[in-house]
Image (cartoon, rainbow, N blue to C red):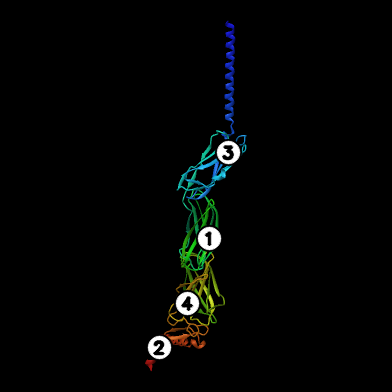
Amino acid sequence: MKKPYIITGCVLMLLILAVSSAAADQSTSSSSSSSTDPATQIYISSYDLDPAVFYTNETGTVTVHVVNPSNTTVGLSQPALISPNIQVSNKDSFATMTTTGSGSTVDYSFVITATGDDGTYFPLFTVYPREFGASAIHSQIKIVVDSKDLQAVISEKPDSFPASVDKNVNLTLINPRAGKLTNIVITPYGDGMQISPGMSYVSSLDAESSVEVPFIVSATQAANLTFHITYQNGNNVHSKDVILPVTIGNDKTAAVPVVNNVALTSKGSYYDVTGDITNAGISDAKGLVVSVGSPATGTETYPEYAIGSLASDDSSSFELTFTTQNLASLPIIITWKDADGNTYQFIKTIDLSSSSSAGGTTSGNKTSKTSSSSSMSGPGGMGGPGGDMGGPGGSSSSSLFGITTSNGGGVSSFYPLVAVVILLAAGIVGYKKRRWIMAKLKKQ
């Protein structure tokens, strides 16, 4: 009786072991299948923003890169970018399923408008694998909205613009934003102005950086110089204007030639004038040349006189030889250049016809500006033809002991001087012989 029970017990034990083994195999198979499910291996590798930083209500793109590292093709569907501060305008582009092959990457580009105020936002990106029951893959995207704009300032300019003289004007661009700006175009314009270059281009300006853009401006009248600036943040075009009021006036840093110690001498058939020039300005005068102006004409040894470079607070002498049919006034012309190659001219007019001062002009290129000049006249004058300073058609006279001498009458002009000398000699002899003469007179 006991033997059947023993057999039955053994059979039951075998059945229990078989069921346990089958359950364990099923559990292992299920675990292995779960660990190698391709859907669970999909991940989001990175994303790109264009522009990197948005203005408020500005449109751009967000591109999310999804990678399939498994050895099986996986279908992805329902990608979305979710945020109350982001408006997606191309939702319909993702209605169909996207298939990503083994080891490949699929890119999802969303066209968005950042509707929020300045700040940082984290919209949620989600996408679903094709397999039934698979969980959604998701990640946060960081989007920055910043309303700070490109800054543009005039970093270098003269106090005033001498008419038709080239002057440097520098414009500095500053990008205070966290993202770069691109395709920056600067177009300057103004009435009565010549500007070089006529347009300047900066391909990109990195975040929190600056660049200086130089221009050369020559103005003939007072007007506004406008720099019109266009630039891009992503594909969005922005613009702004910077205005510089231009006033015409003397350059405070220019060289200022001052003429002193002018002396005029007759040389018979021509005249000779000498003098000193001092640079009372701030800048050096380059290539300084002195000459005479109409009605005088340069001639003989020094028709013009080259001084060269005359530094600030330095001085130099000059000498000019010339002829003229009218010595009532003598224009002395001083021409020089500044460090930028602009040409300046100063005219010192010596008025020899009266004791009044004659006007002088200083000019740079096409312009002129008024300057004072010295009078060289005095008692007796320094006349030309018909005057009383020797030379062609004139005479030079002086007075000695009340007797006037002149070199305009040949040998006869020396007769008065000879008479004076004879009288002086007779007086001296008489003084020395006074005792002898007195003795002779007493004997008589």
Kindly report which numbered mark, 2 or 1, lies closer to the viewer in this rendering: 1
Name the kind of residue labelled 1 in the image. Answer: Thr
Q: Position of residue 17 (x, y in %)?
A: 58, 17
Q: Quadrant of the N terminus?
A: top right
Q: Nearer the viewer, mark 4 or mark 2?
A: 4
Distance, label 4 to label 2, CA atoms, is: 60 Å
Which residue is the site of mark 1? 187
Q: What secondary structure is marked by label 1?
A: strand
**Residue identified by numbered label 4:** 350
Q: Earlier in the sequence, mark 3 or mark 1?
A: 3
- Percent x, y for residue 119? 45, 46
Q: Amino acid at mark 4?
A: Ile
**Mark 4–mark 3 contact, CB under 8 Å?**
no
Q: Residue at x 55, y 37 (%)?
A: 128
Examine the rendering and report whether any part of residue 285 can be seen: no
Q: Is residue 180 above or below residue 41?
A: below
Q: Which mark is residue 172?
A: none
Q: Is residue 17 visible?
A: yes
Of the two numbered discs 2 and 3 in the rendering, the one whose residue sits closer to the viewer: 3
Query: What amino acid type is highlighted by mark number 2?
Result: Trp
Q: Secondary structure at mark 4?
A: strand
Nearer the viewer's eye, disc 4 or disc 1? 1
- Of pointers 4 and 2, the one earlier in the residue sequence: 4
User: Vertical placement of 144 versus 354: above or below?
Assistant: above
Residue placed under numbered mark 2 in the picture: 436
- Label number found at residue 76: 3
Closer to the chain start, of discs 4 and 1, is 1
Q: Nearer the viewer, residue 440 or 106?
A: 106
